[in-house]
Amino acid sequence: MSAHSTERTGPAVGPEETAGPEETTGPEETAGPDETAGPDETYDLPEAQAPEAPEAPAGALGVAALDLKPALEAVLMVVDEPATEEHLAKVLQRRRRDVAIALRELSDDYARQGRGFDLRLVAGGWRFYTRPEYADAVEAFVLDGQQARLTQAALETLAVVAYRQPVSRSRVSAVRGVNCDGVMRTLLQRGLVEEAGTEGETGAILYRTTNYFLERMGLRGLDELPELAPFLPEADAVEGDSREGVPSFDVDDSGDSHTGQTN
């Protein structure tokens, strides 16, 4: 009986083993729970890193997917000055060649359909313009009885600058025969002319026309200015007139204009 009780009580020594310091504080068993949770953490890492990818600006991805021609129309409706093909291609994320072809096709479509507006290449860029045949309707709406046109003196001065640029005020005055300082200030304020350096001999300020001038005149460049010959008098008529008593306007070395008469 005592031997049997010894066999029964033999395993009872286990509590000493469970209470042993190796089992309660051993690194292998304490690491067990961490290892079981380990796989879950390793799968969570990619999900936690996913939001770190750079995000594209809102609408940036959709611009390249838009139809090119309607997108061009929408942009050109809000421009303040002619937009270049390079700028439009950059904004719409397209090749410049594709943009150039689409713009010309749009311009041809508007002309063929006889629309009230036109798409033109002016001053190096594209912009919508109303057609000349509907100018009266636009003028009636915009002006509504107000006069905003340039005076005859301003038009003459602007023409001299356009054909003689860069040119000083004194030389413009010499061509016109009257002082044009006030008119030049008006043209500067309206953005039709701008300063273009100084004259080497006299130090006088030189003036030239602006891109806004080209835009308002509907010109691609100065080479599209009309020839002056059709507006000049015939040579026979000039030779037949007497030169006596006709004032001439010369420019001296100081840049000031003076009038005189031929003898």
Image (spheres, rainbow, N blue to C red):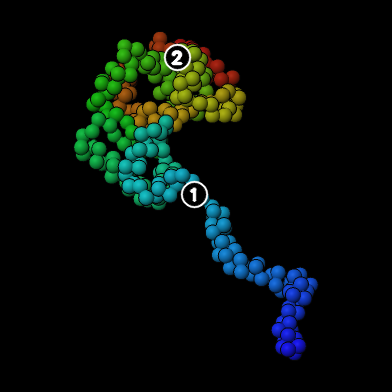
Q: Horizontal and vertical percent for residue 242? A: 35, 14
Which residue appears at 49% of the width and 46% of the height? 57
Which of the two residues, 154 or 211, is positioned nearer the viewer here?
A: 211
* Circle 2 residues within 10 Å: few <14, some 14–19, many ≥20: some
What kind of residue is marked 2? Answer: Gly
On residue 209, the disc is none
In which quadrant of the rendered image does the C terminus lie? top left
Whole-number angstrom distance, CA of label 2 to CA of label 1: 63 Å
In which quadrant of the rendered image does the N terminus lie? bottom right
Residue mark closest to the camera, 2 vs 1? 1
Which of the two residues, 136 or 227, is positioned nearer the viewer here?
A: 136
On residue 56, the disc is 1
Residue at the far right: name it.
Answer: 21
Label 2 residue SS? loop
Q: Is residue 231 left or right of residue 18?
A: left
Q: Horizontal and vertical percent for residue 29? A: 70, 72
Q: Is residue 236 visible?
A: no
On residue 177, the disc is 2
Badge 2 or badge 1: first in the primary sequence: 1
